[in-house]
Image (tube, rainbow, N blue to C red):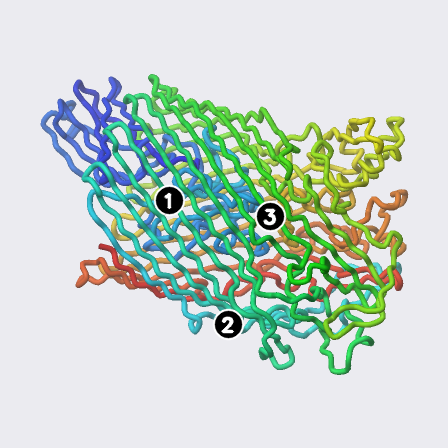
Amino acid sequence: MAQSTTGSIFGQAPAAAGETVVASNSSGLTREVAVDSSGRFQISNVPVGVYTVSLKKDGAIVDTRKNVALSPGAGASISFEAASGATSLGAVTVSANALPSIDVSSVNSSTVITAADLRKLPVGRSAESIALLAPGTTSGSGFFNGPGNHALVSFGGSSVTENAYYVNGYNTGEPYKNLGGFQLPYGAIDQQETLTGGYNAKYGRSDGGVINQIGKRGTNEWHFGGQVSWQPRFLEGTPVNNRYGHPTVPASTSQVNYAYETPSLPGTLHQYRNDNKQWETIYSAYLGGPLIQDKLFMFLAAETTKTQSNNVEVAANQVVQYNTDKNTKFYGKLDWNITDSNILELTALNNRQSTGAGSTYDFDYSTLKAGAFSTANDVTKDNSQFYLAHFTSYITDAATLSILYGKGKFQNPTIYGNTSPLPFISRPQNENPAYLPPGTGQFGIINAQTNTSWSSDNATNGTHGLRADFDYKLSDHDLAVGIDNMAYEAHNQGPNQQNPFNPALNYYWRYISGSTVQKREIGWQTSMRTTQKAYYLQDDWQATPNLLLSIGVRNDHFTNYNDVGKAFVDLKNQWEPRIGASWDVMGDSSFKVYGNVGRYYLALPDNAAERAANTSTYLTTNYNYTGVDSNGVPTGLTTQDDPATTSPDGEKGLPKDPQQVTARNLKAEYLDEFILGFDKKLNDSWNYGAKAMWRDLKTAIDDECSPGHIADKMTKMGLDPNAYYDSLYGASYCRLINPGQTNTILVKSDDGTKSQLVSMTQQDWGYTQGVKRKVGSLNLYMEHPFDGKWQARVDYTYTRGFGNTEGQVRSDFGQADVSKTEDWDNWQLMDGANGELANVRKHQLRIRGAYQITPEWLVSGTLLEQSGYPKECLGYFGTGGSGAAYYGPGKPGDPAGYNNYGSGNYHWCGGTRISAGDVGHTPWTTQLNLGVHYTPAFADNKLGINLDIFNALNGQKAVQTDPAGYSSYDKTTNTLNINNSYGDGIYYQPPRTVRLSVTYDY
């Protein structure tokens, strides 16, 4: 629903001739409709905000409701009742504030946080922090961050790339991988709606959740203000250190040797974090008012944030970074009431971000002190700008036309401060001590290089979109039809393997053991584009005075193009039925029972072309070595294997045929959702309710990398796979498929004279089941809306999720190749994958509230208590018997070459199958935020002095742990090396921080 920037006002009045209802806001908008013969009225598609609603009788106002707040896509219920049993309002005049009521006109599931709420509550200054106030949301893995370096959010167990972001109706999602989205300056947020499900056919392109921000607008009164916010270093809690544990992993010691990766590490510091603190200063200001009274309004807001931090890296890296990040946002809006029936809104949004500026120094873990200067830091830019135009025409009282056009431009270059011509050294702790000079520390030799790859200084993205909606009220039916089109284009995205300061260098070194070192050549910088088109039909039918039926259907069309403009994914006729019902049980908006069933499709972002359809390189070469030079570079190299250089996924730098990289009958990812709930007034002060939700992922897209299985099927078909060798094992080695379904694969003969379609069933791939992600939840709540004195809401959410697929990315080890994860690359990787889901927390308790002690003093707080993350143990496949069982063939009879992953990311540890959650969970976490706000009377309550404490209890539990049970397998000695950091924390709760701020609003 996040493309919605309007709401509705509906209700009842005593039926009488000559009655009308008029609604007006402070931006000069006035809408008037007649009351029908049954006493019902509805004012639809008016901009969100605060309204005064009046009942007129023969042109004279006889009853008024003030402060009627509208939320996007929702309705406000207003009741005009006859006074003292009168049947006519001719002589009765009443004026009162509108009391909160239950919205019986909506079937969606949303949480709306207003600017007034944000002024009261201690909430982080990001859209994601606000979204976490909604039940059913969880923080995503720390591996994934969005624009502004914001941590991301998972909705209903979906992955963090499956969400949609909107500002004033336009999609502002990060266009390359859909990791997060660009958002308003905090002080410019009028409302943020967090949708967790149940939206109708007008809206789509998310099977997770939606974050919808609506910016402030000018009114008939001039207002201005500003804020200074300071988060000082000295008030931050001390981050906890991370020590290497003594990891115990399942082991079949009779069949293979086991050893710690580095025997001396258990008990020593893995990462010195005590000094890894962050401090921040924010300046913001706004100005809004009428350029022409009742006609033309402006609103401007700007915000600049400076964040400084220290980061002592893990011990093996032997460096400390001193960073300075800057983020400046600008928001501007013009509202023009061209006539009483035609409105034009123009929006501009600019975000300029610089991350990582500063320097890197050597760090001595024996003294815990910084040493000599190493290198200037690389600086990542993330600049974006959006321009939106939204025209609304109230053609008649029954007919409304809305047209929105937007355009976005994004630049995200990296400016390299590190100009080292040397190769990066990975896992230096595995360097053979016999080859190192006396006095070398236990973590070996590194150099000043901090990059494994490089990106273009001309990396860009662009979007443009058109949405048109026509709404017509016909008797009891509110009919809508429209189109919803978006286009995305990306240039020079992804890593480049060539060092710009040493053009001859296109690799880095990774030490595997005291005898083996691996050279890695990785790069796939490329361009691509995507189009997403849709149309819909929607009918909100008031079937009876108390029963609303929401019936709609949507059709989406997704097309992804490669770097030469050829389509490799073209998904048409994706029909999405959406059916909802809202029963106003008592007929007075005091008790609602509602339900919703719907299908939601998800497109592939631009990133799908990277590695899957465009040229890519991922080459590895294993060497024996006899020395290590002063820069950590191995010497005395001899290759180990034949062929010496291989690619895990056949990525050898060759162009790919767009027809062969995708199953010819590919279907888009989609899920089915079922919701049943109720909302009820307990009394005039409290509401309560419950909602049950079930989400079932029906189809997903990922890549398989098992050409040998296709060859086997061709043999069964009577074909000679050798005649198609280049097609099977060449550039198109991996293919996008729908796991678990029958996929039709195109292969071409080496001489180019023949093409063959090969139908691959689930059994042909060797999978035992198809894609599975099932999530069920039950939320119970009680709420006391703000009554001028206090407000509170309590939510308890119980969630169970299970399956073999998180979604488009992998949180456990941070794989962000969207819909191209290691899942489904071969059947062995999926053996044991069926378990708990990374983004599901079984128990969640949320409490938020505020209390106005006096007109000058207000206290507030939020609490999020939740159970932990499912732990894993990832290792090498098989039940044992020989080293080959872990590194080569899997089960008996499995031909060599199918299980060719040396990554150790199988759901097996030491001969034991282990699914997520089988080895326990991370601890429960408690996040308590507190706020104290002072608005002194001597400044007419326009000055605010605020103190917010985040994570007041300073809990610093690990929220994610290292899942890799083993670091490597040494074929020479038949030894599995136990990962020293298995089970250690990767990400932790941030320590207690304190924010001091001063605001002034005039």
Residue pointed to by mark 3: 493
> Crowding at label 2, few (<14), some or many (≥20) Cα neighbours within 10 Å?
some
**Sequence-earlier tag: 3 or 2:** 2
- The answer to whether residue 807 is visible is no
The residue tagged 2 is: 238
Circle 2 — which element?
Answer: loop
Q: From this view, report whether residue 849 is shown above or below residue 469.
A: below
Residue 790, given in percent of the width and then of the height, sits at 29, 52
- SS for callout 1: strand
Q: Is residue 33 left or right of residue 420?
A: left
Q: Which mark is residue 348?
A: 1
Give residue 59's position: percent from left, percent from top: 13, 25
Image position of 20 with respect to 120: above or below: above
In whole angstroms, how far apart are the C-alphas of marks 3 and 2? 38 Å
Please name which of the two marks, 2 or 1, marks the residue nearer to the observer.
Answer: 1
Amino acid carrying label 2: it is Thr
Which residue is at a point 35% across and 51% down the rendered structure image? Answer: 792
Separation (CA) of disc 3 from disc 1? 26 Å
**Residue at 46% in and 27% down:** 483
> Which of the two labelled residues, at mark 2 and mark 1, occupies the earlier sequence position?
2
**Quarter of the image that includes the C terminus:** bottom left
Left or right, residue 620 beside residue 930: right
Q: CA distance from mark 2 to mark 1?
A: 40 Å
**Figure disc tally:** 3
- Residue 246 at x, y = what percent? 71, 69
**Which one is in front, 203 or 223?**
223
Which residue type does callout 1 highlight? Ala
Q: Quadrant of residue 556?
A: top right
Q: How many residues crowd around disc 1 within 10 Å: few (fewer than 14), some, or many (20 or more)?
A: some
| Residue 136 visible in this rendered orientation of the protein | yes
